[in-house]
């Protein structure tokens, strides 16, 4: 096989992997809504790719950076809208937990 065919095949595989990941995230989100569960701080940190001891500034910066990549205005599908809602919820959960922690200690 020539390099062009291999590159084309790799792009197709990458596209399928991305599509599968997006579907998995959507299904997982729908199942969580059906169970009535709320987002945990662990899940929120995973979404924003933050350490457990993230500061308010780190949370806001990570949220802003993620939103520049996934904002619904940049995507014609509903996926961007779902991801933006998830990112907003993650930010809110972490900021609320940070505020509660500061009020206690």
Image: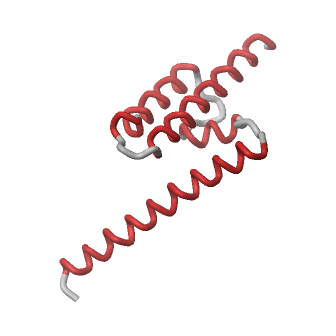
Residue closer to the observer: 89 or 26: 26
| Left/right of residue 84 with respect to residue 10 in the rendered view | right
| Left/right of residue 96 with respect to residue 59 in the rendered view | right
Estimate the x, y position of residue 82 in percent, counting from the top left.
Answer: 52, 40
Vertical arrangement, residue 25 with respect to residue 44, above or below: below
Q: Residue furthest top?
A: 103
| Left/right of residue 92 with respect to residue 77 in the rendered view | right
Residue closer to the observer: 33 or 46: 33
Vertical arrangement, residue 100 with respect to residue 77, above or below: above
Q: Residue at x 44, y 27 (%)?
A: 64
Which quadrant is the N terminus positioned in?
A: bottom left
Q: Residue at x 32, y 73 (%)?
A: 10
Residue 44: quarter of image? top right
Which quadrant is the C terminus positioned in?
A: top right
| Left/right of residue 9 with respect to residue 45 in the rendered view | left
Vertical arrangement, residue 28 with respect to residue 60, above or below: below
Q: Residue at x 35, y 43 (%)?
A: 76
Estimate the x, y position of residue 25 in percent, counting from the top left.
Answer: 57, 52
């Amino acid at each position: 096989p020539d390099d062009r065919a291999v590159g084309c095949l790799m792009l197709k595989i990458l596209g399928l992997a991305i599509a599968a990941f997006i579907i998995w995230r959507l299904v997982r989100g729908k199942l969580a809504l059906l169970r009535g569960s709320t987002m945990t701080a662990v899940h929120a940190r995973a979404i924003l790719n933050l350490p457990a001891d993230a500061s308010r500034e780190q949370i806001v910066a990570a949220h802003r950076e993620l939103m520049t990549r996934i904002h619904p205005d940049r995507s014609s599908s509903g996926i961007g809208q779902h991801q933006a809602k998830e990112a907003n919820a993650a930010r809110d959960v972490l900021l609320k937990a940070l505020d509660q922690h500061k009020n206690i200690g």
